[in-house]
Amino acid sequence: TQLLEQSPQFLSIQEGENLTVYCNSSSVFSSLQWYRQEPGEGPVLLVTVVTGGEVKKLKRLTFQFGDARKDSSLHITAAQPGDTGLYLCAGGDFRAGNNRKLIWGLGTSLAVNP
Amino acid sequence: DARVTQTPRHKVTEMGQEVTMRCQPILGHNTVFWYRQTMMQGLELLAYFRNRAPLDDSGMPKDRFSAEMPDATLATLKIQPSEPRDSAVYFCASGYGKNTEAFFGQGTRLTVV
């Protein structure tokens, strides 16, 4: 069974601080996605990484896919209250024929205090 | 602004009652997912469809849950009879082609008392 473990589970920081959250697995994924979910809303896709070692930047957010495609990290620089939310990672394994199911982590709940 | 639309947003029902949740995927998307989210289990995939055909519903309790796509603009998830343990937020998401990026609706918060 493929599993994605996210850490930390909860994180509370002050505005302006930097942070990194992690998404780890013992399985290899063809791609990995990061989503942010705000209270009362559905998850919203932030980025998809597909190549081992790939780094993508989205303003103050930096996403990295591990060389072995088993893990990923999300780094936020100078966090702002608007970054508050649940950050979810989801891995795709397309080796099993037509399987398009994503494997989801439980998320990191981030609170950025003004 | 294309988005996935789910109705109702909130539903409170008594145990044993039938519950129907509806989803309108983004126009042009050919893949529809139904997820359930709880604090303990996170997001669980219940079923997904491509081109209206069910591809995988292994995550769905077959005895009480059913999912259908009567047409390309409507997906439904039914629970009959509902039980308190079904209380959760149910999300519909849609996507297209081989890309599994999912665009989520706002969810239906179901409470079964």
Image: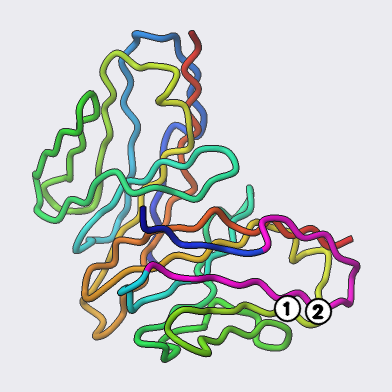
Residue drawn at x 57%, y 38% is A39
A69, B52: nearer the viewer: B52
Q: Where is residue B97 in the image (x, y as percent from the top left)?
A: 23, 76
Left/right placement of residue A60 relative to residue B72 reads: left
Q: Name the residue under label 2.
A: B18
Question: Which class describes the residues within 10 Å of circle 2: few (<14), some (14-19), or many (20+)?
Answer: some
Q: Position of residue A15 (x, y in %)?
A: 41, 9
Q: Mark 1 points at which residue?
A: B79
The scheme the figure's colours follow is rainbow
Residue drawn at x 16%, y 45% is A66
Subunit of label 2: B
Left/right placement of residue B77 relative to residue B16 reads: left
A93, A57: nearer the viewer: A57
Q: In which image quadrant can residue A16 be found?
A: top left
Question: Amino acid type of disc 2?
Answer: Glu
Question: Amino acid type of disc 1?
Answer: Ile
Report the span colored magenta. B8-26
Q: Position of residue A37 (x, y in %)?
A: 47, 42
Q: Are marks 1 and 2 in contact (CB under 8 Å)?
A: yes
Q: Distance between the residues labelled 1 and 2?
A: 6 Å
